[in-house]
Image (cartoon, rainbow, N blue to C red):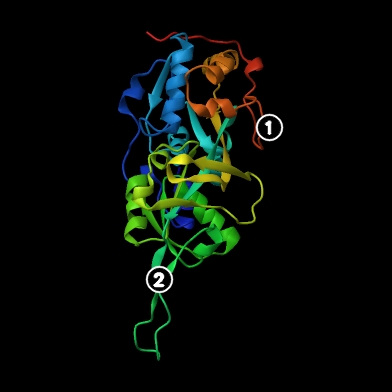
Amino acid sequence: MKMLFMIAMLFGFSLPSAQAARTDAAAAECEGLKVATGKPGKGYSKLFGDIVKVSKGAIALCEVHTEGGLDNLEALSIKKADVGIVQIDALKKLGEGDSNLANLLVVATLNSNFLHIVVAANGVAVEGPKKFGLLKGDSKSLRVARMTELRDAPVALVGSAQLLVRQLDKLLGLNMQYVDVDTDEAAFKKVQSGEVYAAFTVAGWPHGPVSKLTPAQGLTLASFDGAIRAPYLIRPISYKGVGVYNVQALSIQNVLVTRSFAGARNGEVAALKRMLEKELIELKDGGYEPAWNEIRSLDAKVDWPRFDASSFVVMVKAKK
C-alpha cells in the first residue's frame, strides 16, 4: 500500500481515497463477494446494478461504493473489496509499485471508458503579449478544438483523469497546469468561468454529466489528437445535446478484476464469471446500461493475467 501512495506522489496527485476512507462500511458485513464500483448512480455502479438484476439473487454480491477506478485499486489492495472494476492503464501503472495490485487477475473484459475533453464553445479570453514590455496586452478569444492546443494551459481533472492526463502529458509534452477537482460539475464551472481552458473527465459512453449539457451552458467537446500507443485507442463519440458528432476520443479498456485467493472464494468468483457469460445476451438485449452492447466477449484479449474460472469448482452463495 505504501508503494501505491509513493507512485501517486511521484506523479503529482493524491488518490481520492487518501482524503478519507470512502468505501461503503456496510460491505464489511457482506457474506458474499464485495465488489468495488464507484459513486452511486455513476457508470461502474450502474453496471453493478445490472449484474445484481440478472443474477436474480443467485449470487451474494455487495457493493463497495468508492470514488471510482483509482479508489477501487486501493480497495482491492487493502482487502476492502474482493472484485472491482478498473481501467487497465491504471492497473498497469500502479501495479508496478504494489505487489497486491500486480497479483490481481482479470475476470472479464468489459466496456471502454472515454476521455472527455470539455471546453468552452465560444473560446476563452487569453491576454496577448504585453505592449512595450509593460502595458497590458490585447485579449483574444482562444477556441480549443484539439487537445494539443492546450499546451501550457490550466486544466481541471476529475477522478481517474487525474492519473490518466498526467500520464498522457508526459508522453505528449504539453506541460499543462493541473487543477484536481472532485466532481464533473465543479470542473465544468471552472471552464465556464475561464479559470481553466478544459475539463478532463473519464467515463463510459454515454457519460451522464456530459449527456446533460445543453448549448445554453456554452460547453462543447474537443477532440483527442495526440500520438498514443497501447493500451489506448482513439474512437469517435457523439453527444446530440451539445451538437457534437464523431469527435475523436481516447478510449481505455475497463476490466473486472479479482484478488488472488487461496481457498473457496475462488469458486465464488468463478460463479460470477459464469453467470456473466450466461446472461451477457440478456444484458446486451434487455433494458440495461448501453455499455453492455459494446462487449463482444468477456474474454477479449488484454495484456494482463486472467482468472481461469474453469480451474475452480463453482461456489454459489445465494443472497439472503
Q: Residue 174, position in %: x, y?
A: 54, 64
**What's the distance in space between the residues labelled 2 and 1, CA to CA?**
45 Å
Element assignment for label 2: strand
State the image coordinates of residue 297 (x, y, percent, origin top left): 65, 24
Check the picture and name the quadrant holding the N terminus: top left
Give whichever of discs 2 and 1 has the lower sequence position.
2
Q: Position of residue 210 (x, y in %)?
A: 42, 42
Secondary element at tag 1: loop
Instruction: Please give the name of the residue rendered at 51% of the width and 50% of the height, measured from the top-left corner.
Output: 164
Mark in the foreground, 2 or 1 = 2
Task: Judge from the rendering whether residue 100 lies leftward or rightward of residue 35; answer left or right.
Answer: right
Q: Is residue 79 visible?
A: no
Q: Which residue bears the numbered disc 2?
A: 126
According to the picture, the residue beneath numbered tag 1 turns out to be 301
The C terminus lies in quadrant: top left
Q: Residue at x 41, y 47 (%)?
A: 15
Q: Is residue 127 left or right of residue 148?
A: left
The amino acid type, in three-letter code, at marker 1 is Lys
Q: Is 89 positioned to the left or the right of 209 in the image? A: right
Proximity of marks 2 and 1: CB atoms separated by less than 8 Å: no
Visible in this render: residue 188?
Answer: yes
> Compared to 248, does 317 lie above or below?
above
The residue closer to the viewer here, 47 or 259, is: 47
Q: Amino acid at mark 2?
A: Val
Q: Residues within 10 Å of mark 2 (few under 14, many from 20)?
A: some
Q: For the point 47% across and 21% down, which residue is it?
A: 288
Q: Farthest residue in the bottom direction?
A: 132
